[in-house]
């Protein structure tokens, strides 16, 4: 086991923490277009470039669609590539989201969660990244600025693993994390370099063209390959199966990278997929994503002081969805409250829907209630979250109806 390295502490907001992670990760290309509340990330990176503190190509483009397209081109040429966006910018990228994953490009992108228009809104909910949950990207949801820094570094190692080769979104709640100052522990740059290494391009065999010789899977005039050709029903399905298999293999890679990072940093987030809090003897738990789960811990402590057996579980990795792990863990409780900062109109919140699918057929599946909250940046104060916990405790006795509840709205 490695020794935890000495680190320096800086007062950073979440956006700056991500920028510092990119600065230390030996990134070759950053391409971005500004959008609130993400803009600080690329502003800081541009500062680093201007001051000569990093050796990377910073590409200014006319839209988010172009920003991600530039990253795809860079990654296809063997570069380590990064971008950042939010809400409407993510939606403008939508075509290229699928292309990035389908071409197996290990791009890392910070998504600073912001409610999509309309009406126009610049504050946090999760409908932007939830809209991209099926695009083939790994998704990591952070609780605070420290985790945003740690997860960005881990994301490069996860995405570039030859067993994975999929892009990763690192998400952080707009303003709640992105603009909130926090003490963040930074690893020494040389330690991050050693942890990540340089990007190693996968080598493949194309017997019909190059015989038995292995060639790099990248754009290279010496070994010409085609990326993104027409792919009709004769092969398209097989390529989708490869993406499915890569996402399944990502489970072990995410777990391993999380452990390796914990050894050098001293920081871990549950087992890398979920972070339980005081669940060992709990009767009921509340499950959710992002910064709200930090508030949930405070509420758990308060209710524990009143003698109520409650706990919380934060889902950190939403794609690949830790279905088997959650199926096993949640079956231990009588009732589960699900916090959704997003909504699938005409259905439920996205976290609740995925949990229902994961628990379907489980012998000891708990009753579950979906609580939609915080859309458009509406606050989730401790007193409101406490009422939600109390509703889940009450459901243990009276039953879960109604299973869909909206809280914090006039």
Image (cartoon, grey):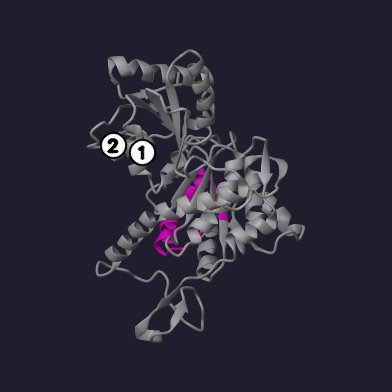
Task: Identify the magenta region.
Answer: 83-107
Residue 156 coordinates in the image, percent (x, y) = 54, 57
Q: Residue at x 27, y 31 (%)?
A: 365
Location of residue 61 by image quarter: bottom right
In the rendered structure, does residue 358 fall within the stretch colored magenta?
A: no
- Compare marks 2 and 1 and give the one earlier in the sequence: 1
Looking at the image, is 11 positioned above or below residue 389? below
34 and 265: which is toward the camera: 265
Residue 58 coordinates in the image, percent (x, y) = 65, 61
Q: Secondary structure at mark 2?
A: helix
Q: Is residue 196 visible?
A: yes
Residue 325 coordinates in the image, percent (x, y) = 36, 41
Distance, label 2 to label 1, CA atoms, is 8 Å
* Residue matched to label 1: 326
Looking at the image, is 14 positioned above or below residue 334? below
* Residue matched to label 2: 359
Residue 143 coordinates in the image, percent (x, y) = 54, 37
């Amino acid at each position: 086991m490695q020794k935890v390295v000495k680190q320096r502490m800086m007062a950073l907001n979440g956006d700056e923490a991500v920028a510092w992670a990119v600065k230390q990760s030996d990134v070759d290309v950053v391409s971005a277009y500004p959008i609130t509340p993400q803009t600080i990330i690329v502003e800081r990176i541009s500062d680093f470039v201007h001051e000569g503190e990093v050796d990377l190509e910073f590409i200014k483009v006319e839209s988010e669609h172009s920003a991600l397209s530039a990253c795809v081109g860079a990654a296809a040429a063997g570069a380590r590539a990064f971008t950042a966006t939010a809400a409407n910018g993510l939606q403008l990228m939508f075509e290229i989201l699928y292309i990035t994953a389908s071409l197996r490009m290990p791009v890392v992108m910070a998504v600073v969660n912001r409610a999509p228009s309309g009406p126009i809104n610049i504050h946090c909910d999760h409908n932007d990244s939830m809209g991209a949950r099926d695009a083939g990207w790994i998704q990591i949801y952070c609780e605070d600025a420290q985790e945003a820094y740690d997860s960005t570094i881990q994301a490069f190692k996860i995405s570039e693993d030859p067993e994975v080769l999929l892009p990763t979104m690192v998400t952080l709640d707009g303003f709640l994390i992105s603009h909130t100052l926090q003490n963040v522990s930074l690893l020494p740059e040389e330690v991050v370099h050693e942890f990540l290494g340089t990007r190693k391009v996968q080598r493949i065999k194309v017997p019909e063209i190059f015989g038995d010789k292995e060639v790099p899977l990248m754009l290279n005039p010496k070994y010409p390959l085609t990326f993104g050709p027409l792919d009709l029903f004769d092969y398209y399905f097989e390529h989708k199966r490869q993406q499915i298999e890569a996402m399944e293999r990502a489970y072990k890679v995410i777990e391993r990278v999380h452990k390796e990072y914990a050894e050098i940093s001293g920081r871990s987030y549950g087992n890398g997929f979920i972070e339980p809090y005081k669940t060992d003897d709990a009767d009921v738990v509340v499950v959710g994503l992002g910064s709200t789960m930090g508030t949930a811990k405070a509420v758990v402590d308060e209710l524990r002081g009143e003698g109520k057996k409650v706990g919380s579980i934060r889902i950190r990795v939403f794609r690949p969805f830790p279905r088997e792990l959650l199926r096993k863990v949640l079956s231990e409780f009588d009732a589960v409250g699900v916090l959704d900062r997003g909504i699938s109109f005409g259905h439920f919140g996205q976290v609740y829907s995925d949990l229902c699918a994961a628990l379907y057929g489980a012998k000891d599946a708990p009753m579950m209630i979906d609580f939609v909250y915080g859309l458009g940046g509406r606050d989730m104060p401790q007193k409101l979250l406490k009422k939600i916990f109390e509703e889940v405790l009450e459901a243990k006795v009276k039953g879960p109806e109604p299973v869909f509840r909206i809280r914090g709205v006039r």
